[in-house]
Amino acid sequence: MELRKVEPAAVFETLAALKAEGYNVLVDMTAADYSAQGRVPRFGVVYRAACLDLETGLEPKPRVEVRCETDAEPGLRSVRQLWPIADWLEREVWDMFGIRFTDRPDIKRLLMYEEFVGHPLRKDYPIKKRQPLIGPKEDPENPVNLNKEKQRVEYD
Amino acid sequence: MTEERLKDGRTAVLLNMGPSHPAMHGVIRLILELEGERVKSTEVEIGYLHRAFEKHAEAEPWNNVVPWTDRLNYVSPLINNVGYCLAVEKLLGVTVPERGQYLRVIASELSRVTDHLTCVAANAMELGAFTVFLYLIKSREVLYQLVDDLCGARVTVSYARVGGVKADLPAGFEAKCRSAFALVRESVRDADRLLTKNRIFMDRVEGTGIISREDAAAYGITGPFLRSTGTPYDVRRAHPYLVYDKLDFEVPVGSRGDNFDRYLVRLAELEASMRIVEQCFERMPDGPASVELSELVKGAVMSDLGKAGRISEIAGKHVLTCPSLEGSCDHGHAGARGGGPSVVLPAKEEVYGSIEGLMNQFEGVMWTWGLKVPAGDAYVPVEGANGELGFHVFSDGGNRPYRVRCRPPCLYIMAALPKLINGGTVADIIATFGSVNMIAGELDR
């Protein structure tokens, strides 16, 4: 496996060049928040591309890992146009880390719900933090108390 | 269901399929725009089963993450265990003894069989073939009992652990396995007879949910789904791990990339996986199943050696502490400790049968004291039942993961789902979705 460290601004060009070289699969894309280690910029983003021979099912060239360090803003240029799967992977990275992707009109959370506030895989997001769940809107006549103990059903 | 009048006067119907729907395999929501019975566009909404696996993994010692990997793909949990442990071991620079590797292969392939049986069974049931479902689930049950013998649990297995496996094969496992396989083969034959030339089944699956191999690659799709398009990519071949390079197995492929091909590929893989297990029984060497616990040295002796500066004699050794956890054996001399807690947790017989075993286990799982992994990160792909299952683990040198990333194979297929079902009919969604074999546990993590 080959590792390439690039500047955030050069990520798109590097990946576009890889795509042109025959790297037809974006195997994975993920990030890590290094703020707990005091690193600046705080995020490390990893793209992993593979060159898959569709006839033999083997990878004639070693996989390439493109890594960059970036802050949440201004973020990275979307690679959705190179590999369609990048759409969902970028949505997940946005959802979990709050890293912006430019060159795409809107970005929706992938795993969390729309009303969720914050980005859970950031190191400063407390693991035990609670957020109100979406659910039936509160009815003023029958207020729902989320902290109320679960009703116990008695079986005989 | 809502009706919307389009600009050109036609009406489009918006249909919500899921999140709670009998054919949605867990919880997922499809928002379909229909024109008559045709699907015009699809929006896929996932995340209903999000359990913060990756976040939780950052808060627990390395070994405690293993039980959570069971819950990722809960139809083939053994493969998840193996994948995670391989990634941590890569970072640690540890190789499991050969017998342990064979055991992991056996476990993985058993899981693959149960996964494919479930997928084919559920797919058939959703298309109305309930008999096939019962036949296949019956043989899956026999395999689950085997898994129970092996790990002590049917689904929440936690069999692989960092540095090895929970235990060697129980007595009589091989014979039980062979007779279970005979039953699986019989029920697969039954399913084959009931489905493969069945007009009703064929009409539903043939030519539906087609994807080209180029599109499949662009979406990062792997596993049986990619193989059904004719690309024989298999992690076990392309990036061999464990002992797969020593085993002979076929990688069945399809040609058209439709639901029928995926069904055929899975049936063929069932047989291939069972042959792998049988080969493992024949070729498996004797020996330890897990990395040996490092040699034990009495704490007082270790301390003396350390004071004398003979560090090389104690490096990598494990300290034998006194049962009270006090006295000269514990913390005898700063730096005189050997490798710290052992990489591998001791076998359960040791834990319950000897004080050293109990203490080793305790050290291994104790808060702030368990296994420490050198800083860095490692990505290891394994062939999950749905495709390339990757674990990318990051360590900052501490006793818990800094970050764990799971590359779930079915996320990639789900992203391509609109491509598969747009243009087809609503009824085709059931057949296509069944062949995707979406597992919400790993999709939403």
Image: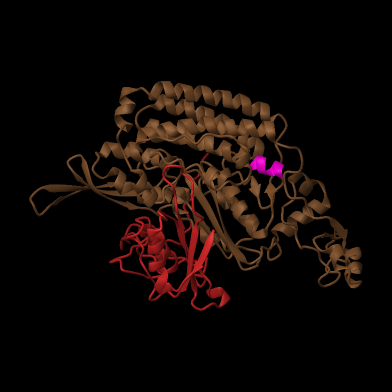
Q: Nearer the viewer, residue B283 or B372?
A: B283
Q: What residue is drawn where x is 85% and y is 56%?
A: B296
**Position of B106 relative to B185 (above/below):** below
Where in the figure is residue B278, as x and y percent of width and height?
A: 62, 30
Q: Which chain is red?
A: A
Q: Nearer the viewer, residue B195 or B353?
A: B195
Horizontally, is A97 left or right of B99 in the view? left
Instruction: Tell me which corner region of the image, top left, top right, bottom left or bottom right, holds residue A38.
Output: bottom right
Q: Is residue B236 visible?
A: yes
Q: Is residue B185 left or right of residue A109?
A: right
**Part of the protein shown in magenta:** B98-104
Chain letter matching colour brown:
B
Q: Main secondary structure of the magenta part?
A: helix
B96, B214: nearer the viewer: B214
Which residue is painted at 51% across and 79% down in the image?
A40
x and y percent of residue A147 in the render?
A: 46, 62
**x, y percent for residue B399:** 66, 64
Q: A30 or B121, which lies in front?
A: A30
Q: Quadrant of residue A75?
A: bottom left
For image coordinates 63% across by 45% down, the residue present is: B242
Percent position of residue B345, x then y = 72, 52
Q: Does the segment drawn in magenta span residue B100?
A: yes
Q: Is residue B25 magenta?
A: no
Image height of B281 relative to B78, above or below: above
Q: Quadrant of residue A142?
A: bottom left
Say how many tags the image has. Answer: 0
